[in-house]
């Protein structure tokens, strides 16, 4: 399963979240789909389609962790 073979990253990034999910889920077996929809990130946040970004390699990025990284980056910038 590698969406990147069929869809280059620049094309992937033009799609909406919902479109990315449709494509991502169409590449998965039912078992993989369950794992995708009900997993957790490294920090223990529930990973649902609503709070994660799908990636073309079949993994997901946690929106909460992403936001937290941004917050830390912005905080560091303020103290410069
Ligand atoms: Zn997280």
Image (cartoon, rainbow, N blue to C red):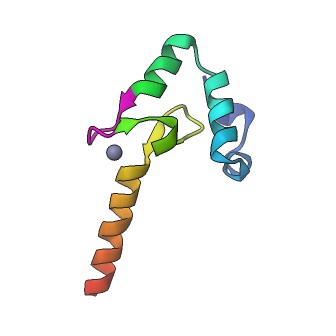
> Is 15 in front, or is 12?
15
Establish if 45 lies above or below 2: below
Which residue appears at 34% of the width and 38% of the height? 41
Q: Which residues are magenta?
A: 39-45
Q: Residue 8: horizontal and vertical position, in percent?
A: 71, 43
User: In the drawing, does residue 20 fall left or right of residue 61?
Assistant: right
72 with respect to 2 (left or right): left
51 lies above or below 79: above
Vertical side of 6 occupied by 30: above or below: above
Displayed-image quarter of ligand 1? top left
Note whether residue 6 is visible.
yes
Regarding residue 52, the answer to whether it shows in the image is no
- The residue depicted at 49 percent of the width and 12 percent of the height is 31
In this rendering, position of residue 29 left or right of residue 47: right
In percent of width and height, residue 1 lies at 60, 22
The correct choice, above or below, for 11 with respect to 29 in the image is below
Q: Residue at (47%, 18%) from the top-left corner? A: 34
- The percent coordinates of residue 33 (x first, y second) are 53, 20
Q: Is residue 8 magenta?
A: no
Write down the quadrant of residue 21 in the picture.
Answer: top right
Residue 77 percent location from the top left of the image: 33, 81
Q: Main SS type for the magenta part?
A: loop
Between 17 and 6, the one nearer to me in the picture? 17
């Amino acid at each position: 399963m590698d969406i990147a073979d069929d869809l280059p990253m620049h094309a992937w990034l033009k799609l909406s979240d919902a479109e990315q999910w449709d494509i991502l889920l169409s590449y998965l077996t039912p078992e993989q789909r369950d794992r995708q929809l009900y997993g957790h990130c490294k920090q223990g946040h529930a990973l649902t389609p609503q709070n994660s970004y799908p990636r073309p390699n079949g993994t997901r990025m946690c929106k909460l962790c992403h936001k937290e990284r941004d917050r830390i980056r912005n905080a560091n910038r303020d103290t410069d």
